[in-house]
Image: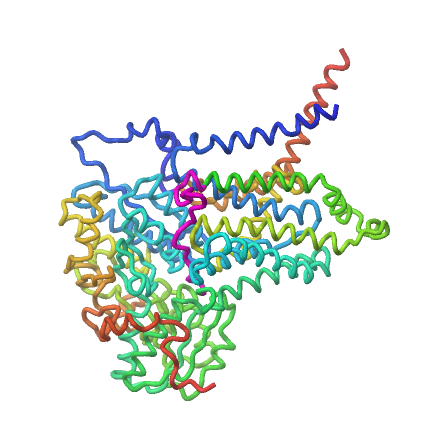
Amino acid sequence: MKITRRNALRLSLAAPGLAALRRPARAAQPPIRLGFLTVKTGPLASGGIQMEQGLTLFLKEQGGKLAGRSVELFTEDTGGVPANALTKAQALVERDKVDAVVGPLAAFELLAIIGYTDRQKMPVLAVAAAENISQRTPSPWFLRCTSSSAQASQPMGYYAAKTLGYRKVTMIADDITYGYEQCAGFMRVFEDNGGKVIQRLWPPLNAPDYGTYIAEIRPDADAVFQAFAGANGFRFTQQYFEYGLGGRKPIIAGMTGIDDSILPQIGNIALGLLSTCFYSPALTYPSNKTFVAAMRKTYHADPGYYSAGTYVTGQVLAAALEKIGGKIEERELLMHTLRTSVVPETARGPVRFDQFGNVIGNVYIRKVERVGSWLVNVPIHTFHDVSQFWTFNQAAFLKDPVYSKTWPPTRYIEH
Amino acid sequence: MSLRCSAARSLPALGLVLLLAVLPFILPGPFYIAIAHQILIYALLALSLDILVGHGGMISLAQAAFLGVPAYVYVGLSARAGLSPLPAALSALAAGTALAGLFGVLALRARGLGFLMITLALGQVVWGLAYRWVDLTGGDNGMRLSARPRPFGLDLGRPIPFYYFVSVIFLAALFFLRRFARSAFGASLRGTRDQPRRMAMLGHHVFRIRWLAFIYSGFLGSIAGVLFALSFRFISPQTMTLQQAAEVLLMVILGGPGTLAGPLIGAVIITLVKTVVSSYVARWYTVLGLIFIGVELFLPEGLVPGFARLRRRLGAALLARRRPA
């Protein structure tokens, strides 16, 4: 099952003359055909595999059924390459005839497929955080249950200025759009509340060593906001401590910077570090307790950003399907229901959606603590029902350019 | 003799034309037709690289740049500057060809490993520019193309017309390459590969021959680049990564450098493993690796020349068996 998903027989059944054979008997409802775009090879594979863990556990927990219909999951590996993501999306839509797609992982994959999936009227329930896909260039077939890039970093900007009382902060993130967008959101809110971003550092995604960047961090910074993705957050944090800055200058992290999936590798030095995210394994919602227990039992790991992302996506999809009697083929109805429902009980807490299909839900400020034998990002503060627009006026927000390296302009960085 | 020979030679060509013509009716759906045109685009890129690798003996790691740069120019000019498809495509081809001219001047100062390293560096420079020059290229998010053009009322947005569009261009390029391989210029390029000193002594301008080959190669690669942009309607720096450059080189090596069928066969195998086999086998990289090892062990000159050798040997063995009687 794990290695060969479908046997050769299925391929021959795909021939046009035999297509009729695949049509099931009228009495039983045919299975829901759910597509899943993830990354199982290449540098993004760790996140992609976690996405698969989250979704697999959710479907298993539901007994392989959503709204009374059995679910057939079609998993495709994009390799984290945009062109492959598009080809795989075509495979899911045209060959496997799926009714909806969960994924993809990366922003550039999502941007590569969204034109195609829109033309095919294919619901896409993505994990990728790209801002504009739920803002200035929205898609009617898009839903995101996790977070836009800045949705969690904006509250962190507020928290750092108001509660932590930081005045001067250095920002460091991967030199990719995801890094720019998180940092721009953080900077905007932090500076609106009296803080100053005095420095921005953009190490390349594949930087072998952060030593030179850590040496550049200005001594007068109160704290460092790091918004890395994947294993880079772990490598940066480890080297930060090796260079002796740990404990002297606090780190505050974005939503993937100190992810629970990499906490065991970071080890005890992570204790006390703060981060912001839409999720924490320590949340006490009943479904989250079930989820965390299942993750620990099956994969011996705590769920992080990616596995929680697909798990919550599954919960939201299941709730919408319950409402429409499992009729996933009625895609307009499905999208409408997905976007207008309030789901009171997910692993991350209650969620609803804005007109662009982006989630409105809690954002947690978390602190690394030891709970039993596990290092866990434990929530210490909750921002309720956070939208991607934070507290800004939506129309004014959308008139501005999208968050980037150059927007909003820096005010306090000396050159 | 010569007449029979040429008829026998054009037989595979006719077969290929026929196969490409009927393929959409054999394949089970639009997805596989899309895979077919993707294979042709990658095959075109591999064939363009084979001018350098097979005929010129120059192993380049910069060929992905000719996939990416024209695609960027095409998408940029049509999506951002609002240029109509034909001038955008011509500008893209011109840009790709000019880039090849520049790359040639820089890289041809070295041979062998030095040449390989310079082309690697040039490819990385272009990739880095696309990645970091966010205002121009959109950075890692890339750029989208809203629609394919409709030349003469032909809707290229639909899978079958687009497939035939790509097929016709591919066949034309293949025809051009066949002429190229048999031309005096092709022969002199192979001469510079095997005996550069003698070629120079005979009065050939070795650098100019190689440079022209580089430009031909860049031009053909740029056609693949524009088709790539039309096919995926999306371009991002990932099109120009080292991985992509190496993949095209592997297509050439796998199929057999210096042949017309080789790069095509290489493109078929690698693209099929990447897009179709990977749906069924999670460890598809391993499958690809095993194929490479197998080919390198048993047919080190590549699939097409290797099988030709096996056939010759088999024929000789049969003849030898018949003779004693």
**Frontmost residue, A255 versus A133:** A133
**Frontmost residue, B27 versus A190:** B27
- Residue B152: say if magenta: yes
The location of residue B21, given as percent across then percent down, is 49, 32
Q: Is residue A76 left or right of residue B118?
A: left
**Frontmost residue, A22 versus B163:** B163
Quadrant where the image shows the N terminus of chain A? top left
For this orientation, the residue located farthest to the right is B201
Is residue A248 visible from the viewing direction of this image? no
Q: Is residue A222 left or right of residue B315?
A: left
The location of residue B276, given as percent across then percent down, is 44, 40
- Residue B269: say if magenta: no
Q: Quadrant of residue B278?
A: top left
Q: Which residues are magenta?
A: B139-162
Q: Quadrant of residue A183?
A: bottom left
Residue at horizontal 15 percent and vertical 57 percent from the top: A341
The location of residue B154, given as percent across then percent down, is 42, 42
Q: Quadrant of residue B13?
A: top right
